[in-house]
Image (spheres, coloured by chain):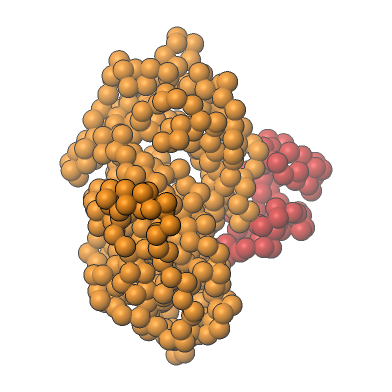
Amino acid sequence: MLLIECPWCGARDEPEFTYGGEPAVRPGPATEVGDAEWTGYLYLRGNEKGAHRELWCHSAGCGQWFVMERDTVTHATIAVVRR
Amino acid sequence: MRYSAFSLLRQGLAGHAGWQQAWRSPPLQPRYDAVVVGGGGHGLAAAYYLARVHGVRRVAVLERGWLGGGNTGRNTTIVRSNYFFPESVALYDFALRQYEQLSEELNFNIMLSQRGMLCLGHSEHDMEMMARAVNAMQINGIDTELLDAAQVRAELPLANFTADARYPIHGGFVQRRGGIARHDAVAWGYARAADALGVDIVQNCEVLDFIITGGRIAGVRTSRGDVAAGAVGLSPSGHSGVLAAKAGFRLPITSYALQAMVSEPVKPVLHMVAMSWATGMYVSQSDKGELVFGAGLDLYPSYAQRGNLPTTQAIVAAMLEIFPAFRRLKMLRQWAGIVDVPWDYSPILGPSPVANLYLNCGWGTGGFKATPAGGYFLAHAMATGRHHPISAPFDLGRFSTGALIDEAAGAGIAH
């Protein structure tokens, strides 16, 4: 069970949260973006073993999205930032 | 040494002193024609098919830990080919057909038990989706049958058919050729057969980096020294993203923990593999009598091979709602494997962005059942430089062209 530090509500249990994937910046303008860049944005991921930047939503709490850096081996939280 | 009832009898009478080592532990050579990274079932199968089908002479399998110590030894041993799309059926039924004759081919008993796999429908809507899935599977030549509630009850008398069941059973469908096989035996059988064909299986040998010159793979850097290689195949399961990063590219894959657990052993109570679509829970009884069960992925990426409690609770709760009689069993073990899941829940096979480096990854939650196929098509790509027609739709390029094979939506099940 993870104890996740919501930047607005404080520490809450894992079932209150929803994992939202790795943060990515949408490329643009769309007419100038090629297939390779779209593929990278839509599908390709770092999937790091160790420190991993992730979007999380406190879905059963305040409903806010935030970025959490988390170790995918130990599951320890490295940093939590509002966005 | 050939294994047979006669050799067993002879060795038994001789006090079992004459059994030979099933495979060698050779030193790592400085150069190979083909190097397979990952000594699980898939990697060992690839080495076997490289030597047997393609006649490649100098083949090595490099394994960071011990043979079959990753997901090969952590899965729930289920084999089946009840997929939705024709491309998937061609792939997974190829594997199942290989399994059906693998004990004879490898001279190693993989303990294949085609006891049938039965998926439960918990609502009229489930039954409509199952009718659609069964029709698709039958068109693709897969032996599936739609069952009504009475037929399911005849097969699974311990399932909860009471009026107040949390997950009422409206019917289901069965693939009679589905079942279970001994997962360790698959790895050991391939290892022994590959070794007999001259393949070097090197354990405790971690791949640290790749040697790439001019966009072409030249070899691998390992914890036991550098190895030059003509072709390199990746069969690393949950660590595919880690190896891809070393080779300088990213994959459309996220690694998650997938849990499983076993109960204490009991006398035969469940003669099929039972699965519930709505909860993702599946359970079978091993030959030792333990109930082996699991369900969906943990909820966020992980490389920790243990799994977290909220998912464990959900799996156990689902099983007990459907099989209340199992409530009094003690749990023996719980564990997790790290599975590499692509967006469309279909594997990624064939060429990679680096020349002569080939992929066999993205099997996600369903790699064991596909072991012979993963090995066969990786060997084909490494030996010929091209896709086999069956593996072609599973090329990495589908994420650029948009031709995804969306089994997450198609078959509705992740395992």
The residue lying at 76 percent from left, 43 percent from top is: A3
Q: Is residue A81 above or below residue B124?
A: below
Q: Is residue B305 left or right of residue B200?
A: right
Give whichever of B50, B211 is nearer the camera: B50
The residue lying at 21 percent from left, 37 percent from top is: B143
Q: Position of residue B380 (x, y in %)?
A: 28, 70
The chain drawn in red is: A
Q: Is residue B209 visible?
A: no
Q: Is residue B285 left or right of residue A74?
A: left
Q: Is residue B287 left or right of residue A81?
A: left
Give the quarter of the image for residue A60. Answer: top right
Q: Is residue B102 above or below residue B272?
A: below
Q: Position of residue A51 (x, y in %)?
A: 69, 63
Q: Is residue B5 above or below residue B268?
A: below
Q: Is residue B344 above or below residue B309?
A: below
Residue at the front extreme, as displayed: B14
* Chain B representation colour: orange
